[in-house]
């Protein structure tokens, strides 16, 4: 026993010496190759910028793995219990409430404790910055969505999903509506006016067009989220505690959003095309809808799905103004083995310069508020959308946004209301019955 | 008297102690017989215990908890089970599961037997081609199938509604929103995927029916249809039972098709199946304890169905031997 022990310690010493000699002997320049695995969705990690970073750092290999938002969330939960291969994980803001609450922030590295190294100094990211020092670049309430209730910073914001109305100028013209964006925006100062405009549009459709399912807006159900996000409180009211107070039964904003949406559904202005379904994609090409409530990130989707409609779109203000949908945080899981490299990539990728590039190619609207008075952003126009000053329009919208307290089960409650409106849209239930079912379904979420 | 004695002796005869037969060594590796046997089979059982038995026991355990993977868990007694019985979604899921099962299994039987009867035809050309092509749907990814079928069944631009709209006075059917239409859509996907596989099974057992039976039937003047009805079908009885049992097992596990159509099982839960219900409670709502309780409930449902299957199979087997 003693013998083997001494032998072991001797071996240990030998290894220690070998290692330290190796460290001393290793040339200071050759950086170790690092592979950064990024769990992401949609267009959060932009291939062009990924290539650019790899060119800056040949030793870094970036491997983005895409999932849908909800499966990714599940994967993140599981990997937090078991460990996993990811170095960076994207989570959407509706899930931020979940990760900020309780002991769940422990799943992620507190980004205040990391400091940027000097690898990106030439690319504009100074060395020695922690999350606290880059905070000032971002929209404050967007930043807060990545700060846990125990104050640790678990995620850095990517984009902010400012919401506007994308509309088809050719179809508007055909229906005798104005086509320039200023007059179109004036058509709908309120949601009621928006619905009225829709009815005017639909009344000009031929019976054949009506039969083929054409409508004013792709999915009248999407109005719900838009109205909801124009308020300041959704299903949780901040009350000083982490979890917030549940107000899904009493918040008047919900009732308002529900009633407005039901009114829109019953007015027949919707083409009843669920977003991101195959019918929606086809309908976009066939002019089945004249308007889409489009967050900035959706513009790129429209371009890709309906390339032939180039130049036929334009962008107007959202009724009432200031809508929001989506947005993502990038986080480093605590089990990551390459935290330093991951943090260096994050701070570079989410720096204002890169965010501007992402916006110009992918339409993701930057959450780096330092850009909001930058001419490069404000002067940006998009040919596809009739040269609309996309930068200006979305900046104006985003500046009107108010922070909303995102609670633990936000996403789930949102989708329950969505299903409820689906039942109304398909006329499977009366609005009253469907609403009651929504409430009882949400009640169930908090049992067991 | 002697007779009686003799008789007595005769009755006694079988009672004479039998000679102990020497145990015949089974052919095989002798050293595996004794102490090496257990280590040899251990790898399977170890893996089975770790990945089979342990999770089952663990899920029975957590079925009595309010179990959040990343939060506090608390003992919940039998609340999960009482809540399950009151949960309307559970009963809807049972309804949907059986409805989809029936809509996929019975048409599938009919189509598979008919296809097998056609393929059995001796004059058919390119036999192996047809047989191979039948298996292609079976190896196609469910996701791909769902995407294609979603387009076929699409409300506005789907092929099926396109054909229906040629008939005057027929409105487009919103397949996904309806209860039975959505079940039909899912059942069609399942049928399309499995019908070829079952056809081959039927074909194999049809080819095993001796030709003499058909010859004597045709000598007796039976038409093709009568031959099919009185010779082919009765000989397929056991195969039909087999296909039904396998179909039932598959039917209780229908998951990917509805999940791909809508992760929640539809706006009125119109195509929420039992396994999808379990999955959603665990992995959408993070209620692991409740999901474990659902798993136990599904086990009981499977037990009941197995018992019914067992009885039916025994009856059919009994009839067969008569």
Image: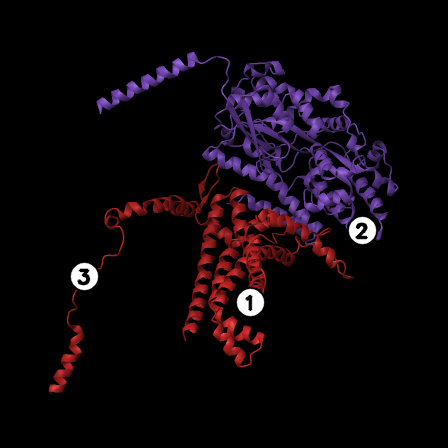
Chain colours: A purple, B red
Q: Residue A270, which numbered label?
A: none
Q: Which mark is residue B22?
A: 3
- In the displayed structure, A14 sits above or below B80; it is above
User: Callout 2: residue from which chain?
Assistant: A
Give the residue drawn at x 66%, y 56%: B178
SS label for mark 3: loop
Which chain letter matches label 3?
A: B
Q: Is residue B98 above or below residue A364?
A: below
Question: Could you say which quadrant of the image residue A366 lies in?
Answer: top right
**Distance CA(mark 3)–CA(mark 1):** 54 Å
Would you say residue B32 is visible in this rendering?
Answer: yes
Residue that appears at 69% across and 51% down: B154
The percent coordinates of residue B180 (x first, y second) are 63, 59
Q: Measured along the vertical axis of the image, is residue B244 above or below residue A254?
A: below
Which residue sits furthest right? A176
Q: Residues within 10 Å of mark 1 (few under 14, many from 20)?
A: few
- How far apart marks 1 and 2 lie (CA) works out to 54 Å
Image quadrant assignment for residue A322:
top right
Return the chain for callout 1: B
Spatial separation of the CA atoms under disc 3 and disc 2: 89 Å
Looking at marks 3 and 1 on the same chain, the residue that comes earlier in the sequence is marked by 3
Rendering coords of residue A215 (x, y %): 78, 46
**Between B322 and A116, the one nearer to me in the picture:** B322
The crowding category of the residue bearing disc 2, from other C-alpha atoms within 10 Å (few below 14, some 14 to 19, many at least 20), is: some
| Mark toward the viewer: 1 or 2 | 1
Q: Residue at the far left: name it.
A: B2
Label 1 sits on a secondary structure element that is loop
Image mark for residue B122: 1
Q: Name the disc covering residue A210, or none.
A: 2
């Amino acid at each position: 026993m003693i013998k083997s022990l001494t032998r072991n310690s001797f071996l240990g010493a030998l290894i220690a010496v070998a290692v330290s000699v190796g460290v001393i002997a290793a040339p200071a320049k050759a950086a170790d190759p690092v592979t950064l695995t990024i769990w992401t969705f949609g267009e959060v990690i932009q291939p062009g910028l990924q290539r650019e970073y790899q060119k800056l750092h040949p030793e870094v290999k970036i491997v983005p793995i895409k999932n849908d938002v909800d499966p990714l969330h599940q994967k993140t939960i599981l990997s937090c219990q078991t460990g996993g291969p990811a170095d960076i994980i994207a989570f959407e803001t509706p899930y931020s409430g979940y990760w900020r609450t309780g002991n769940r922030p422990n799943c992620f590295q507190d980004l205040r404790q990391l400091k940027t190294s000097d690898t990106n100094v030439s690319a504009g990211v100074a060395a020695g910055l922690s999350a606290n020092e880059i905070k000032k670049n971002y929209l404050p309430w967007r930043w807060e969505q990545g700060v846990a209730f125990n104050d640790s910073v678990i995620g850095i914001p990517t984009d902010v999903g400012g919401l506007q109305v994308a509309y088809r100028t050719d179809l508007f013209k055909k229906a005798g509506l104005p086509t320039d964006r200023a007059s179109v925006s004036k058509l709908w100062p309120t949601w009621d006016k928006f619905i009225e405009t829709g009815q005017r549009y639909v009344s000009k459709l031929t019976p054949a067009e009506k039969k083929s399912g054409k409508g004013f807006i792709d999915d009248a159900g999407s109005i719900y989220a838009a109205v909801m996000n124009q308020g300041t409180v959704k299903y949780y009211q901040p009350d000083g505690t982490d979890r917030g107070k549940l107000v899904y039964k009493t918040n008047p904003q919900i009732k308002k959003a529900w009633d407005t949406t039901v009114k829109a559904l019953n007015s027949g202005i919707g083409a009843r095309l669920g977003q991101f379904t195959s019918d929606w994609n086809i309908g976009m090409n066939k002019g089945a809808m004249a308007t889409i409530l489009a967050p900035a990130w959706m513009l790129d989707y429209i371009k890709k799905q309906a390339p032939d409609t180039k130049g036929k779109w334009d962008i107007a203000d959202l009724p009432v103004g200031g809508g929001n949908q989506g947005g993502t945080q990038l986080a480093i899981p605590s089990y990551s083995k390459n935290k330093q490299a991951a943090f260096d990539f994050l701070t570079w990728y989410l720096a204002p310069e890169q965010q501007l590039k992402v916006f110009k190619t992918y339409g993701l609207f930057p959450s780096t508020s330092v850009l909001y008075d930058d001419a490069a952003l404000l002067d940006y126009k998009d040919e596809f959308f009739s040269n609309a000053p996309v930068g200006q329009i979305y900046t104006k919208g985003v500046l009107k946004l108010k922070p909303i307290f995102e609670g633990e089960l936000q996403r789930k409650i949102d989708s329950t209301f969505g299903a409820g409106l689906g039942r109304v849209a398909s006329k499977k239930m009366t609005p009253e019955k469907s609403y009651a079912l929504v409430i009882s379904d949400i009640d169930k979420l908090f049992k067991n | 008297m002697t007779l009686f004695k003799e008789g007595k002796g005769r009755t006694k005869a079988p009672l004479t102690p039998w000679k102990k037969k020497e145990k015949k060594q089974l052919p095989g590796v002798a050293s595996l017989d004794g102490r090496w046997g257990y280590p040899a089979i251990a790898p399977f059982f170890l893996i089975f215990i770790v990945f089979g038995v342990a999770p089952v026991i663990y899920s029975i355990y957590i079925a009595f908890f309010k179990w959040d993977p990343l939060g506090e868990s608390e003992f919940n007694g039998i609340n999960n089970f009482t809540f399950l019985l009151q949960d309307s979604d559970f009963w809807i899921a049972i309804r949907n599961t059986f409805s989809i099962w029936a809509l996929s299994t019975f048409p599938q039987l009919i189509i598979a037997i008919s296809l097998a009867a056609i393929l059995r035809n001796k004059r058919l050309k390119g036999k192996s081609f047809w047989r191979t092509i039948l298996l292609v749907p079976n190896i196609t990814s469910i996701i791909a199938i769902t995407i294609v079928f979603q387009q076929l069944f699409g409300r506005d631009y789907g092929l099926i509604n396109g054909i229906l709209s040629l008939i005057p006075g027929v409105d487009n059917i919103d397949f996904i929103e309806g209860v039975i239409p959505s079940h039909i859509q899912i059942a069609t996907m399942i049928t399309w995927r499995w019908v070829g596989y079952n056809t081959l099974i039927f074909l194999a057992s049809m080819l095993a029916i001796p030709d003499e039976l058909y010859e004597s039937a045709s000598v007796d003047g039976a038409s093709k249809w009568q031959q099919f009805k009185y010779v082919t079908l009765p000989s397929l009885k056991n195969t039909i039972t087999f296909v039904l049992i396998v179909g039932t097992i598959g039917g209780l596990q229908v998951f990917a098709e509805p999940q791909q159509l809508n992760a929640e099982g539809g706006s009125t839960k119109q195509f929420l199946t039992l396994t999808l219900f379990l999955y959603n409670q665990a992995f959408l709502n993070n209620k692991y304890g409740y999901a474990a309780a659902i798993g136990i409930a599904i086990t009981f449902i499977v037990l009941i169905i197995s018992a019914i299957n067992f009885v039916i199979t025994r009856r059919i087997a009994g009839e067969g031997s008569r």
